Amino acid sequence: MAYFRSHFSQILRGGRTPICALLPSVVLLSSIPHACLAQTESPSWYVSAGGGLSLPEGTEKSSLQHSWDNFGAGIGFNPCPALSKRFFIHVNFLFDELDVQQQALNQAKTLNPTNIGILEASKAQAKFYSTTLEPTYRFPAGDRVNVYLFAGFGWFRRSVEFTEENSGQGALLQPGGPAVFGSGGNSGAYDAGGGFDVRPFRGRLKLYWECRYLHGLAVNHETTLLLPVSAGIRW
């Protein structure tokens, strides 16, 4: 104990460890809002899951069909309820599956006459995966209704899978038809949108509806998805 008292005294006197060495930690701690540090309860949070309609837009609008095969899930939390009860950080995962239109499949065969896999394909599907970090602003529109707006950035993957329906391998081995060719790529993406949720009963359970715009970057810069109808539950 005598050693620690002596060492601490030297710190205060500017001995072996100058007092200025402690300044970065002091500045860092002071930058954190004192109101957040004083919170004793867990910050507000929620989880959500749902699905809806996906519409291809832009360049791929004429190549892909709209689809109801989409699934979204997310989790959100309020980093500092004492400063703002309306600002949330939301992490969202989204999966979409859209069928390729027949004329687009025929065009792919025409443009790739030496690719045996594409020539044998009788069907193709495009699949999209994304995970985005979305700052979200929520505000009340009634006793049981909240409206929210969001925009974010994250990871995006697009893949196209060509399959052969009549492979002769039997339903046991290939119940959905074997894949004969596939391509895909990863990139960044940004999204934006808004919606509202309604609490029909007392408690945490809510029903939500939202619209989302998702656009890929880099190798996926021609991919744009519009989700005008997404609904689900939030708790």
Image (cartoon, grey):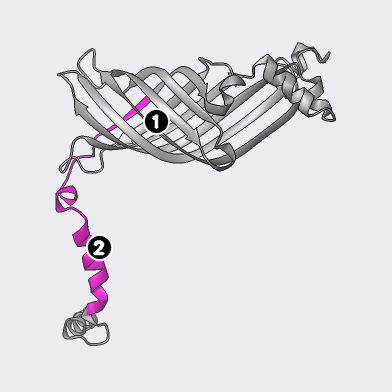
* Rendered location of residue 59, percent (x, y): 57, 28
Crowding near the residue tagged with mark 2, few <14, some 14–19, many ≥20 C-alpha atoms within 10 Å = few
* Rendered location of residue 157, percent (x, y): 56, 35
Label 2 belongs to which residue? 28
Q: Amino acid at mark 2?
A: Leu
As measured in the structure, the alpha-carbon distance from the residue carrying label 1 to the one carrying label 2 is 31 Å
Report the magenta residues as a range: 20-48
* Rendered location of residue 22, percent (x, y): 24, 73
Residue 39: within the magenta?
Answer: yes
Q: Earlier in the sequence, mark 1 or mark 2?
A: 2
Which residue does the image show at 50% across and 14% down from the upper left?
68
Which residue does the image show at 41% across and 19% down from the upper left?
228
Quick one: quadrant of the N terminus? bottom left
**Direction from residue 210 to residue 71 in the image, left or right:** right
What is the secondary structure assignment of the residue under circle 1? Answer: strand
What is the secondary structure assignment of the residue under circle 2? Answer: helix
**Quarter location, residue 23:** bottom left
**Quarter location, residue 162:** top right
Which residue does the image show at 28% across and 20% down from the upper left?
197
The answer to whether marks 1 and 2 mark residues whose Cβ atoms lie closer than 8 Å is no
Q: Residue 16, relative to residue 83: is it above or below?
A: below
Q: Amino acid at mark 1?
A: Gly
Crowding near the residue tagged with mark 1, few <14, some 14–19, many ≥20 C-alpha atoms within 10 Å = some
Label 1 belongs to which residue? 74
